[in-house]
Image (cartoon, helix red, strand yellow):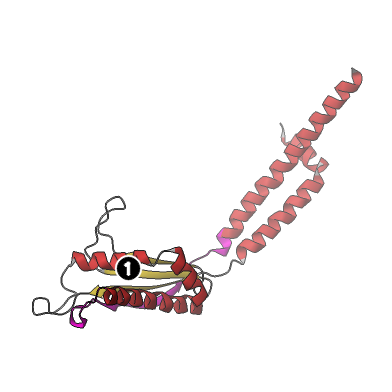
Amino acid sequence: MYMTDVLRALSRRWYVVVAGVVLTAALGYQAARVTPVYLASEVLVVKYPVSPDAPNPLTGLYPSVAVTAAAVATSLRTPAFEAEFRRAGVTGTYEFAPRNTGTNQEPRYIISSLTVTNTTDSEEGALRALQILTSAYTDKLKELQDRWNVRQDLRFTVSTLVAASVVELSHSSQRALIGSAFLGGLGTLAVPLWVDEIIRRRRGEAAAADQD
């Protein structure tokens, strides 16, 4: 097919070209005005009780503490807790991510810290959700120790290792416009040619049937 054939086909199906241009413009407009997304994060650490043998619990590695911290994080990933978080005002996506020093196939937890994150469309909402999530983690650890009747002087405690912060996730409006223009332009050229070929083929088949 020569360029002149392409131009003729496009001119014959001009209404499809116009529809493609309108859809491309609408797609580009929506892509360029994507709502900003914010990521809030905080790093917590579960500490072993201070003792003469371990005056600074942050200087040693205690696998049992790390496993407990990971278990508490896992217990908060259930549908019941998700529904509770939603009712409390947590929006977007959230995660409790224990520090894994192994692999996905063979996880190893020897560092008792975890990162709590929330991704949503509001900076204030992300920080507020982070407070709800971190409080839930602390309360869950306390609840477990209450159930196990752990003495107060032997209890694990939760501290903030890295303070809560929030950043806006990058989004390039220019890149979105270029991508939308490319996809829309490709469709605007391909669809009219495809429609033109189908109509021409059907007319040819109808003409051949009339001759018979």
**In the foreground, 67 or 26:** 67
Instruction: Give the extent of the magenta segment.
Output: 148-175
Q: Residue furthest left?
A: 53
Which residue: 72% across, 36% down? 3
- Say which quarter of the image contains residue 1: top right
- What x and y, as percent, mark residue 209? 87, 22
Magenta stretch contains residue 167:
yes
Q: Is residue 184 left or right of residue 117?
A: right
- What x and y, as percent, mark residue 70? 30, 65
Residue linked to disc 1? 72
The crowding category of the residue bearing disc 1, from other C-alpha atoms within 10 Å (few below 14, some 14 to 19, many at least 20), is some
Q: Is residue 41 left or right of residue 105?
A: right
- What x and y, as percent, mark residue 23? 71, 55
Q: What residue type is disc 1 on? A: Val
**In the foreground, 66 or 154:** 154
- Say which quarter of the image contains residue 143: bottom left
Which residue: 73% across, 50% down? 20
